[in-house]
Amino acid sequence: GVCRADVGGDISCVDARTRRMCKRLAGPAGAVWSLDVCPYEGDWEHRVAGAGYDRHVMCWNLSSRIQAPLASVYCKQRLMDARWVPALAPSDDDERPVEEGEEDEDEAMGFEG
């Protein structure tokens, strides 16, 4: 499908094969500057983020029947774009990153490794 938005704040999803609207989302008050479909799989699959003229960044779940956004954040600055970035959470096989100014426990206790 294809997500589209307009200057009136209307956001809808259209089936590319049939060219029929399959979902309408509750958008911001005013123009929608950008929409970005989440490229990540798993829990974040089927999510769309959008930035509007009303200074809100919103996130919707396309696989849900609910039209309202999952989350909405008001920004003091006007935004022209909204993009997904990779999550910074460590994976199961990564060690916990050491914060700046934080010593490793072994070093703090005087152990050498």
Image (cartoon, helix red, strand yellow):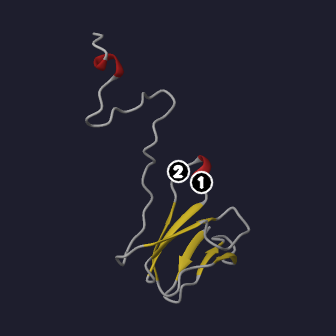
Image coordinates of residue 71 in percent, x first then y, are: 57, 66
The residue sitting at 63% across, 71% down in the picture is 16
Q: Mark 2 — residue?
A: 40
Q: Quadrant of residue 105?
A: top left
Q: Earlier in the sequence, mark 1 or mark 2?
A: 2
Q: Is residue 89 above or below residue 10?
A: above
Q: Mark 1 — residue?
A: 45
Q: Quadrant of residue 110?
A: top left
Q: Is residue 83 above or below residue 93?
A: below
What kind of residue is marked 1? Glu
Image coordinates of residue 36 in percent, x first then y, are: 48, 66
* Mark-to-mark CA distance, 1 and 2: 6 Å
Label pair 1/2, CB-CB below 8 angstroms: yes
Image coordinates of residue 5 in percent, x first then y, are: 53, 80
> In this orientation, which residue lies closer to the viewer: 33 or 19?
33
Q: Residue furthest top?
A: 112
Local crowd size for mark 1, using a 10 Å CA cut-off: few (<14), some (14–19), many (≥20): some
Judge left or right: residue 100 versus residue 36: left
The residue sitting at 71% across, 70% down in the picture is 66
